[in-house]
Amino acid sequence: MSALYGTYARTDVAFARGEGMRLFSTEGDAYLDFMAGIGVTALGHSDPEVAGALKAQAEKLWHVSNVFKIPEAEKLAERLVAETFADSVFFTNSGAEAVECAIKTARHHHFANGHPERTEIIAFTGSFHGRTLGTIAAGGNPAYLEGFGEPLAGFVHFKPGDLKAVAEKIGPNTAAILIEPVQGEGGVTAMSDSFLRGLRKLCDDHGALLILDEVQCGYGRTGKFFAHEWAGITPDIMAVAKAIANGFPMGACLATAEVAKSMVPGTHGSTYGGNPMACAVASVVLDKVLAPGFIEHVEEMGKKLNRHMQQMMQKYPHYVTEVRGRGLIAGMKITPPVRDFVARLRDNKLLTVAASDNVLRFLPPLIVTEAEIDEAFAIISTTFDELAAEQTGEA
């Protein structure tokens, strides 16, 4: 019996090493990785430059404290500010912490401006913002809320895409609207550009803040540095994590100067957030993601992946009913139980991940090639054929 909490239904596979798009099990089997640690290892496994940065920093300084200046954090924050809408950054250890910081920043902004009543956050069904008490309340999923007492107050939820419903609810107590431009866990649902633009206008009209959760869909995954760029809008606050340090635990909350200025000493903190090790790794990741041609490659590979999904829907209409997502955060809604199908694919040495609404989710490292996409969908096709043979008694 494991000494770990039983909070994960772990499959009986363990990995000893990784290289690029491949993971190698302790049994010596090679797996094609189309989940990237759920959107984390954007540069693949064992990237030599990332590993080199970690080793070099490990020999100098791991951790001090945020009571001191941390040059590595200052430099990384300046670079993120230069590449985004933001003027200010708070570093965290995870996506949930980044969203928590975003919520606190939004509410404190209104408090500092003489409107302590503005605490309500408008959020959306199907969202996933983390597993803390605050972020499960923001997500609103009953399955994640059950057993933990009354949910944290101050969140209301609407179906994504219903701008009219949001417009009717937003009011003098609204602090912010919180949304993922592309939902990951909730079923790989990409918000329309017009819906995101409508939310931006509602916030502007009512003095509310727009918070974007780009923990999973950001950092190049959709074919833009951040997914909101497709809609031609900017948020007031944004949560980032997952790919930011390619697997080294890190997140960030980005905000405009006007919004961040009330977050003075004592309002928020983090023991490990932005330590030298994390920032050294994240700086190299940022170098590579922003290198000429990298994000353009992601956009092109996203188109190829989408074409393969469309072909699957044509070839297996009884198994594939819908394709979703944007770029390299993509999914197919399927009729076989998705977790069973993920296990079948794993048996055939392809790693994918399930999402809500019976969606098979694809989150390959952003370095994926056309040949590897072809290989992945050949495995998927073979797996559908195996399933069909079983169902017709021909296996």
Image: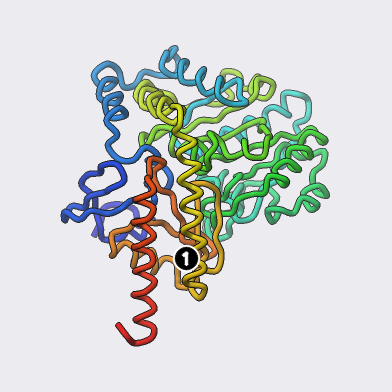
Q: Is residue 223 visible?
A: yes
Q: Residue at x 60, y 18 (%)?
A: 264
Q: Quadrant of the N terminus?
A: bottom left
Q: Residue at x 50, y 20 (%)?
A: 79
The answer to whether residue 235 is left or right of residue 374 is: right
Q: Residue at x 20, y 47 (%)?
A: 16
- Specify the farthest residue to the bottom: 393
Residue 93, by quadrant, is top left
Q: Is residue 186 visible?
A: no
Residue 323, by quadrant, is bottom right
Residue tagged by mark 1? 312
Question: Of helix, strand and loop, which one carries label 1?
Answer: helix
Q: The disc labelled 1 sits on which kind of residue?
A: Met
**x and y, in percent, of residue 162 in the image:** 74, 54
Which sits in the foreground, 204 or 344?
344
Q: Is residue 282 above or below residue 8?
A: above
**x and y, in percent, of residue 278 in the image:** 38, 27
Q: Quadrant of the C terminus?
A: bottom left
Which sits in the foreground, 114 or 201?
201
**x and y, in percent, of residue 4 in the image:** 30, 52
Q: Residue at x 69, y 36 (%)?
A: 210
